[in-house]
Image (cartoon, rainbow, N blue to C red):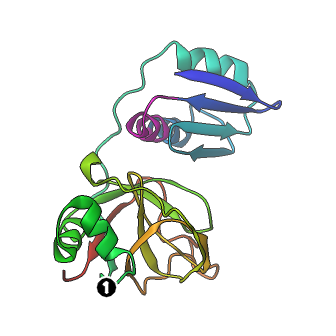
Amino acid sequence: MRALPVGNGALLVEVSSDEEAQALHAELVRRRTEGSLSVREIVPAARTVLLDGLADPVRLAAQLTASEVPPAPPRPREVVELPVRYDGPDLVDVAAHWGVSPEDVARVHAGTEFTVAFCGFAPGFGYLTGLPARYDVPRRATPRTAVPPGSVALAGPYTGVYPRSSPGGWQLIGTTDAVLWDHARVPAALLSPGTRVRFVGAP
């Protein structure tokens, strides 16, 4: 673990894996909730956690690098279910990459419980982990200029859902009508770090 100061009141903590980042994020959120950590924002990413609004980032950096981060606690039982149609334009290509049929891609994907590791790229976009490493897929060689909202996509070890139309190079395997971001909703984002997710749809 390495802690790097960012400006006067922030700290970027680097770890070696998604799992460590999720565990560190959960521990820091726990400390903030119990009152032992005063921080304005805690933002997880693939292998980092950013803490912003710290009174003494140097002291916290020393504490973190000298301690062990406990494993992430058991996740909440609630699971967000996203209805999905496995009708994406890249479904056949993903099936070929996996060496299975398109129906098997749908079966494996719908049979997996995902966890939101972190959010970014666009409001409401969550990077979901859960598929075994053998199902990693490369990004498209040529990104699309406009991916339709609700597109369920794969890239590397992640699954994601495009909350709105935007450029993108992920492999599109399906579509959902779920609203990922609604500024009139509280919270606006349907998915947040730590959320458990299942895609519900027939192969």
Q: Residues within 10 Å of mark 1 (few under 14, many from 20)?
A: some
Residue 163 picture location, percent across and down: 54, 76
Q: Is residue 95 above or below residue 184?
A: above
Q: Is residue 89 above or below residue 78?
A: below
Residue 90 picture location, percent across and down: 38, 75
Magenta stretch encompasses residue 16 = yes
Label 1 belongs to which residue?
Answer: 85
- The residue at the far right in this view is 8
Could you say which quadrant of the image residue 172 lies in?
bottom left
Magenta stretch encompasses residue 150 = no
Left of 113 or right of it: where is 3?
Answer: right
Looking at the magenta stretch, what is its main secondary structure? helix
Q: Residue at x 56, y 29 (%)?
A: 14
Quarter the C terminus occupies:
bottom left
Q: Is residue 38 above or below residue 187?
A: above
Residue 2 can be seen, yes or no? yes
Name the one closer to the observer, 64 or 163. Answer: 163
The number of callouts visible is 1
Q: Residue at x 59, y 30 (%)?
A: 13
Q: Residue at x 40, y 83 (%)?
A: 176
Could you say which quadrant of the image residue 45 lies in?
top right
Residue 126 picture location, percent across and down: 49, 62
Left of 162 or right of it: where is 7?
Answer: right
Name the one closer to the observer, 7 or 98. Answer: 98
Looking at the rendered structure, the kind of residue marked 1 is Arg
Could you say which quadrant of the image residue 182 lies in?
bottom right
Query: Helix, strand or loop at disc 1?
Result: loop
- Give the magenta range: 15-26
Name the one closer to the observer, 93 or 74. Answer: 93
